[in-house]
Image: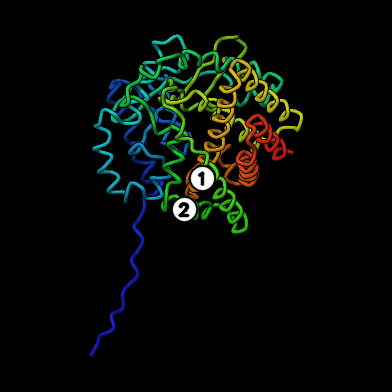
Amino acid sequence: MSTLTLSTPRSPVPVPQIAEVFGFARAQIHQAAADLWPRADIRLGAHVPSITGYVTHLAVDERPLYAKYSYLGISLVSLLRGTGGTWPQVQQAQADYVRRPDTLLAREHAQLQLLAQLDGPRACAAAGLERGVLFTEPAIGSTLGDLLLRTPAQTIPLLEGTFAELRPLYRARTAGWLGPSGAIGERSIAATFARKFNGISGQTYLDRIGADRCPPAIRTEVAGRLRAVVVRLRHARLAALQPAHEVLTYGELKPEHVLFPDGSGERPLFIDPGLGRGRATSDAAKLISRIVLRLLVARPTPSAAGQVLDGIDAFAQHRVALRSAKAARSWQREVLIFWMMDTTNLLSTVLSAPPGLPLNERTQALADQPLAACRLLDHASAAFLKQRDVPTAWHTALDSAREALA
């Protein structure tokens, strides 16, 4: 006589909760500050929303600072989705992680020290590293993103000023300044894309995008368009680029990471480096990607948006004019691929964030209204694969941005 056995469905593994993740980070930051400045009055301030790590304002004897804490070197989105395991598992792994000499923030601290010794780019000063917590001095000025929205007619000089400051990183043999253990490869556009969208896990990731943030109809369109974009970009075979052209790249070149001192005419100041060994085109592409996204969420007047896009095009054409025809096509092709990859990377991360995770104003707007960016990616990537003429594909991408902003 056989016996019927009823099995109880396995309960989902509990993922870390935002309150405990944030509370632990704040406690570690306070203790690290007390260890570095044992006689100081330490007051933690407001949390700075981020999808990568925990960031907060603090004051040490009235001295304003920023503090940053990273869990296992992965994003908060991944951590809160269970990539690091349950909360007890994360705590145990984190205790081992912060003792390593090559943690993400230890490398960022070393990079800030390296940049302080170079003739460019100017970067914010590191104030200390303790218990896995990085403390930095605040940077004063208007961000590149804010200036582009306020003074779109100045797009060309603003972009030229930004890249003039970065020029020392792009000189021959600069990649050797930073050994493999000192690079922040986690910020690489191509590596991030490959990690997110590789194989079966990548398809599962795409299937889940927007599940907790988008209404069903919007989620269906977003997932469908992003799936098509990913297939096209994987066919672009970015891995075929020759490593011999590697230089030192800034890595985290976003409009909000470039500050121009107000009214002083001084050189720009950069924050949050993610120096890596790669191609200088990845920096140009990330900045273009994030500027276009900033336009999509800010929705300036058509005239202002057009001035910024025209400025981006003029900036690119200037770089093309300095190269041979073959090198110019290669530059534009690389920037296009990196641009689309970066936008895809960010969109997928934002749309995968747990609903309770605080987002800054820009990323929240992107999460609330992702269709314009998805349609831009879909149109631009489709045109890129169809058109063998790279300059035409470049202008198609800019036209797609103009259409999305219309």
- Viewer-side residue, 181 vs 332: 332
Q: Position of residue 119 (x, y in %)?
A: 45, 9
What's the residue at 46%, 53% (across, down)? 203
Q: Quadrant of the N terminus?
A: bottom left
Give the mark count.
Answer: 2
**CB under 8 Å between discs 1 and 2:** no
Q: Is residue 134 visible?
A: yes
Inspect the image, locate mark 1, and give the three-letter code of the amino acid beneath it: Ser
Which residue is located at x 54 percent, y 50 percent? 227
Q: Earlier in the sequence, mark 1 or mark 2?
A: 2
> Which residue position is annotated with label 1?
348
Q: Is residue 397 above or below residue 58?
A: below
The x and y percentages for residue 154 are: 68, 18
Residue 143 seen in the current view: no
Instruction: Find disc 2 in the rendering and name its residue.
Output: 203
Instruction: Inspect the image, locate mark 2, and give the three-letter code of the amino acid beneath it.
Output: Gln
Left or right: residue 100 versus residue 43 is left
111 to the left or right of 157: left
- Helix, strand or loop status at disc 2: helix
The answer to whether residue 381 is above or below residue 106 is below
